[in-house]
Amino acid sequence: DTEVTQTPKHLVMGMTNKKSLKCEQHMGHRAMYWYKQKAKKPPELMFVYSYEKLSINESVPSRFSPECPNSSLLNLHLHALQPEDSALYLCASSQKLADSYEQYFGPGTRLTVT
Amino acid sequence: AQSVAQPEDQVNVAEGNPLTVKCTYSVSGNPYLFWYVQYPNRGLQFLLKYITGDNLVKGSYGFEAEFNKSQTSFHLKKPSALVSDSALYFCAVTLYNFNKFYFGSGTKLNVKP
């Protein structure tokens, strides 16, 4: 199984809503990532988890709250988002933290904030 | 600071012709270089990487890339393009123990029948 799955595929939420994005992998990878991608732009790193511990937070606003409950699962909790947060949110995993290990990406969750 | 440049927003090529998608990098150290492809409404898909060793790297779907240290480049190539190769291509660089990738701005490849 070389797949990273993400749910939901699409999400529309109001600015006062609370929602969560879910990412799962069963490849035994110990590093997991959240990226935000605007249309026709490269992915921007948000968070990195290594062995279920937050390793990198790229100064992301607190309305985005990551969680890694176990080695296979990564969540992104959303609260009080702004319309400019609308984007494709990509999850990725790698065998270990970055450098020589390629990252495997999920298909993404298309988020629209109204 | 580390950076990656993809100088072409778009590359157009006829099916059956060779294709090249350009990437140059600037890092303070020995780079680890990657190419990813993204189809519409999909995540990124790994194509190939250069870590060390032979400068010519072969990857998925017939793609290859050549690491050129003197020109700080890592151009993606394919001898014969397919219409199905049409997608958005991203070059990325990282360093040993650096823990994050720097992505280029992306190049849209259009292969016409």
Image: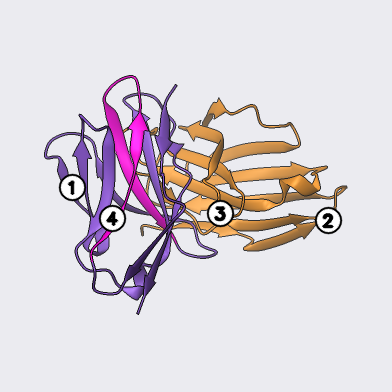
Chain colours: A orange, B purple
**Percent from the top left, x then y, of residue A38?**
62, 50
State the residue position of label 1: B57
Q: Secondary structure at mark 1?
A: strand
Q: Tell me: B51 left or right of A65.
A: left
State the residue position of label 2: A114
Q: CA distance from mark 1 to mark 3?
A: 27 Å
Q: Residue visible at 27% across and 69% down?
A: B81
State the residue position of label 4: B20
Q: State which tag comes first along the sequence, 4 or 1.
A: 4
**Percent from the top left, x then y, of residue B90?**
41, 49
Mark 3–mark 2 CB contact (< 8 Å): no
Q: Tell me: A51 left or right of A81.
A: left
Quarter of the figure with the C terminus of chain B: bottom left
> Does the magenta segment cover residue B31?
yes
**Percent from the top left, x then y, of residue B30?**
26, 25
Q: Nearer the viewer, residue A114 or B68?
A: B68
Q: State which tag comes first along the sequence, 3 or 2.
A: 3
Quarter of the figure with the N terminus of chain B: top left
Mark 3 on the same chain as mark 2: yes
Q: CA distance from mark 4 to mark 2?
A: 40 Å
Chain bearing mark 3: A
Q: Which residues are magenta?
A: B18-38
State the residue position of label 3: A40
Q: Which of the two discs, 2 and 1, sits closer to the camera?
A: 1
Q: Residue visible at 34% across and 43% down?
A: B23
Residue B51 can be seen, yes or no: yes
Q: CA distance from mark 2 to mark 1?
A: 45 Å
Q: CA distance from mark 3 to mark 2?
A: 21 Å
Mark 3–mark 4 CB contact (< 8 Å): no
Q: Secondary structure at mark 4?
A: strand
Q: Secondary structure at mark 3?
A: loop
Chain bearing mark 2: A
